[in-house]
Amino acid sequence: MSNVPAIDIHNLTASYERKPVLWEIDCQFPQGKLIGIVGPNGSGKTTLLKNIMGLMKPDSGYVKIFGDKLNKVRHRVSYVPQRESVDWDFPADVMDVVLMGRYNPKKLFSRITQEDRDIAIEALKRVNMLEFSKRHISQLSGGQQQRVFIARSLAQQADLYLMDEPFVGVDAASEDAILSLLTEMKNNGKTVVIVHHDLQTAYEYFDYIALLNTRLVACGPTEEVFTSELLQEAYGGRLTVLSRIGELIAKKDFPVREKGQKDN
Amino acid sequence: MDSLWTYFNHPNFWWVLAGTTFLSAISALVGTFTYLQRKSLMGDAIAHGILPGVAGGFLLAGEKNALIIMIGAIVWGLLTVSSIDWISRKTHLQNSTAMAVVLSAFFGLGMMLLTVVQTSGLPDASGINSFLFGQAASMLPEDLLVYSVFAIVVAFVLAAIYPHLSIISFDRAAAQSIGFNVRRIDAVLSILVVAATAIGIQSIGLILMAALLITPAAIARMWSSRLIGMLLFSGAIAAFAAGIGAVISFTAPAMPTGPWIVLVLFIFTLISMVISPQRGLLKQFRQQKKNQNIILRENFIKRLYHQWEKSGQTTFILNELKDKPSKRTLRFALQNDWIHQVGITIHLSEKGLREGRRITRAHRLWELYLSRTLRMRDDHVHPSAEVMEHLIGDDLEKELLRTLGYPQTDPHQRDIPYEP
Ligand SMILES: Nc1ncnc2c1ncn2[C@@H]1O[C@H](COP(=O)(O)OP(=O)(O)OP(=O)(O)O)[C@@H](O)[C@H]1O
Ligand SMILES: [Mg+2]
């Protein structure tokens, strides 16, 4: 694996109707890590992801992926939108949705091949949803819908995965299953970037964190980012969360500095 | 019967029948995608907006020339789409407002041109009215050929970009991230809607064309929950309705075709609302009936369990029960070995006891959950639990037990019963 960062965000400012919601974001995400974009509601996490994926145009700055323009490496990147962003009443079963990961934007008259089907089945197996492949997508629980989205993403066979809040509305068992899948992907050399708003689990889940609140509060290995000053800065004033996280850090015998030095 | 045969022997009858069914099916396929993208209004705006193109085409050709009228319709349809798009981008008007503005302005203009045509003394000038409400029987094989060529092109484009259309209908963001050019696909779909509208102007007419784009899709959705099934279904329904319209158009030439087609579609809608397997009222009714039965029998066994809880009694005299079970409930309980019956007494079995305990446990767990987690007052939690006890299955029960930490008593200090 090369040392080029998976994602290089350079002085990025983005706005909706001229009102900036992200200010001068500048950070790099290394390859082969499980990375969290963490911040309170409305802090611009989804917006950052959209800018990385070229779904909106930044006012200034740019994003490079694997050191290249997105269009050059698009086939190596897969994006999983927030689950609520689609209509789950759409007429499709689980298999249909996963197969969408195999659609080719460049080809006309393209048809699904047996190879596509095999890849989709493999993806469904990995998220433990194969038995539901004929089920209509509206008849799934939130956690199952999320896993279908992840399966579609896996079917794209990318190297970099960006997922928006995959743990929202998911029960504990599904959350564990998804997390172990993400970890497995990381161990296979994939880079996985997750938007997440829960601080407690963020500390346990991620190797690397970008702490966001309209501006970038911190970006680095989890141990370096998880200091009470930085958290206070990002989540400002929400002392209950912070005191709980303090407890957690204390309970886990959290090494505030020493361990951080092993990275990079 | 004899008279019907004479229509069938009319030289154009089979042409018109085959043509209108084909054209309508293609229109409905395009309509299915607008339906799924919640752009139903778009079809209506286009259908009304192309009237100036139709009347203008007529004036330009100086006669009822299908090709020139069709081209006029398509050009004006594209103008309609781009005006709507332009207005909603340049102003703060909502898209639907922009549509209404353009639709009414263009339709008004079209009506003016229509009057010009009618007073022009051109040959066929009176026939222009058939474009408003459709007159399938008045179509000549040459007209049909023109419309069909356009319809074949539409079908060809649909086949080419079927994956594109389906992915952007479901998940635009993901489609865009994969590299689909969503704006271009949107534009192509708009053009397809314009073409799909224009091919139906003579058989269905402008005014009711939108119904042909949307209603078959809405009906199909009630019968199929996969895109491919929906497409087949909506195409077939549209073809069938148009076929009936064509037959009527020949038997009663004075009557416009469009209203008949829409009427048939409406009847299909009503029928589907009642009997469709997905959301039909009949199905809902059956489901409610089923739920009702579940509630009745679970309440029955719960009451026996409560008596057992109080007194340890497992034998009851049927006629002395406070709420006598219905025959159906009793039969179900017997068949499932919840109870055994000896003459007029019934005996609560081990299995019945377990079932009663399960329901009671679900009830009390739910009360506790409401009281603890939602901080509801203890005297307010019972009504909700009366319903939820029938819904809470094994999974949810486990989840509740875990969340509440295997509690011993409910908010009313009654024991939460576990399996011994
Ligand atoms: N389409 C939009 N138009 C205008 N403003 C928007 C739009 N989408 C988001 N915003 C605003 O931009 C800000 C950042 O939104 P964003 O969705 O990126 O936050 P987020 O961190 O993902 O929040 P959440 O945790 O709620 O998903 C918010 O203040 C939001 O109100
Ligand atoms: Mg978000």
Image: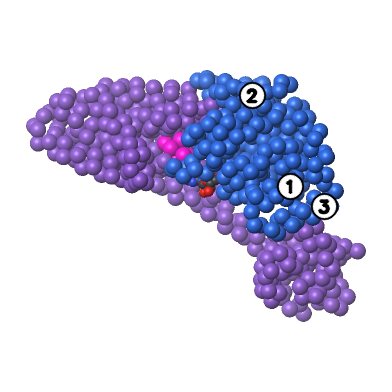
The local crowd at label 2, few if under 14, some if 14 to 19, many if 20 or more residues have their Cα within 10 Å, is many
**Residue type, numbered disc 3:** Ala
> Mark 2 or 1 closer to N-term?
2
Residue under the point 78% across and 59% down = B403
Q: Earlier in the sequence, mark 1 or mark 3?
A: 1
Which region of the structure is painted magenta? B31-38
Q: Do discs 1 and 3 share a chain?
A: yes
The image shows residue A184 at horizontal and vertical percentages of: 77, 32
* Residue type pointed to by label 2: Phe
In the picture, the disc for residue A227 is 1
Q: Tell me the element at label 2.
A: loop
| Relative horizontal placement of residue B230, taking residue A151 as reference (left or right) | left
Label 1 lies in what chain?
A: A
Please name the residue that numbered disc 3 is placed on: A250
Q: Which quadrant is the N terminus of chain B positioned in?
A: top left
The answer to the question of whether label 2 and label 1 lie on touching residues, with beta carbons closer than 8 A, is: no
Same chain for labels 3 and 2? Say yes or no.
yes
Quote the CA–CA distance across marks 3 and 2: 37 Å
Given this view, does label 2 or label 1 mark the residue nearer the observer?
1
Q: Vertical placement of B378 versus A126: above or below?
A: below
Element on which disc 3 rests: helix
Q: Is residue A153 magenta?
A: no
- Which of A207/B140 is in front? A207
B300 lies left or right of A114: right
Res B204 seen here: no
Residue located beneath label 2 in the image: A66
Quarter of the view holding residue B402: bottom right
The mark that comes first in sequence, 3 or 2, is 2
Disc 1 is placed on an element classified as loop
The vertical placement of A238 against B312, above or below, is: above
Rendered purple, the chain in question is: B
